[in-house]
Amino acid sequence: MTIAPDADTTSAPVPTQSTYQNRVAEYWNAEENPVNLELGKIDDLYHHHYGIGDADRTVLDEPDPERRRKRITTELHRLEHAQAELLADRLGPLSPADRVFDAGCGRGGGSVVAHLRHGCHADGVTISAKQAAFANERARERGIDDHVRYHHRNMLDTGFETGAYAASWNNESTMYVELDLLFAEHARLLRRGGRYVVITGCYNDTYGRASREVSLINAHYICDIHPRSEYFRAMARNRLVPAHVQDLTAEAIPYWELRRQADHLVTGIEDTFLTAYKNGSFQYLLIAADRV
Ligand code: SAH
């Protein structure tokens, strides 16, 4: 590189949304996997995350093929809903006057669960315009659109009011962004003493670098799974102090074992998740932190 004293220092214009973020938005605008839509139709709660807890495997023994599909779909939805409830539990105590921020909200299920649980106001943010429109439509149908709103925005730069939120979370959406930028925005939005919760897959530092399975998951979703240690480092740098850490890996396995047998719902990534969880290279983690 040559440094000339009179070099032209005009910098290139920075796009409001990076090429990578455009790709992520395109992915979620086009996404119509039955595992996301069929489960949501059951009770209009659309979750785009995985499930936890023991699965009722007797649904696999159902002899009637149509009924079998339905029972498997319902059971997977129950497990996904249990995950959303676990997260909502960790946000509290909240009052109906409080606001919460759902970062990377997908088709909106998490904000509805939080509102139904705590009566609070919720702002969900997704980089997919289609998801935000879909989620707002569901909130209108449910008659809660005065409390629960979805926005087509970047969660790293929401433009929302500083210190206005009592709680915030990421449910399986941290692997799309740089954690320092994300946690800085949460720290800005949360009031002092506010609660931040994340549920995420992360790779296990004890194993070493990202395993082959973790790399396959990254390619499948166009994401970049962070190592476990990075969550704690980035939180510490951004006024977020962990109050509760829970390894959900063992509790996530029954969901994947059932899902891999759901021929009408599989996306092809099921065995990769199971191998990654079982060989110790990948963990499913909940961290609840206080904004200090
Ligand atoms: N939390 C939701 C959806 C998880 S899927 C749920 O539990 O159901 C991941 C989500 O992250 C998608 O909605 C995607 O649009 C969103 N996302 C990824 N990068 C984002 C960004 N930079 N800003 C806002 N949302 C983003």
Image (cartoon, rainbow, N blue to C red):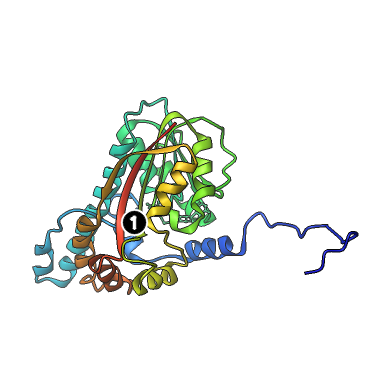
* Residue sitting farthest toward the right: 6
Picture coordinates of residue 272, whole percent (x, y): 30, 72
Amino acid at dot 1: His
Q: Nearer the viewer, residue 84 or 207?
A: 207
Query: Quick check: 120 left or right of 262?
Result: right
Q: How many marks?
A: 1
The residue nearer to you, when weighing 34 against 187, is: 187
Residue 93: where, in percent of width, then height? 32, 29
In the rendering, at what x and y percent does residue 244 appear?
Answer: 30, 40
Q: Is residue 63 left or right of residue 154?
A: left
Q: Pointer 1: what residue? A: 49
Residue 155 appearing in the image? no
Quadrant that contains the C terminus: top left
Residue 33 pos. (x, y %): 37, 66
On the rendered image, what quadrant is the N terminus found in? bottom right
Q: Is residue 261 visible?
A: yes
Please give the name of the residue rendered at 15% of the width and 58% of the height, measured from the top-left corner.
55
Ligand 1 within 8 angstroms of badge 1 C-beta:
yes
Which residue lies at the image location 55% right of the left edge and 65% below the top edge? 23
Residue occupying the point 58% across, 62% down: 22
The vertical placement of 117 against 79, above or below, is above
**Residue depicted at x 41% and y 50%:** 231
Question: Dot 1: within a 10 Å radius of its alpha carbon, few (fewer than 14), some, or many (20 or more) residues?
Answer: some
| Element type where label 1 sits in the image | loop
Residue 73 quadrant: bottom left
Residue nearest the viewer, comparing 290 with 15 = 290
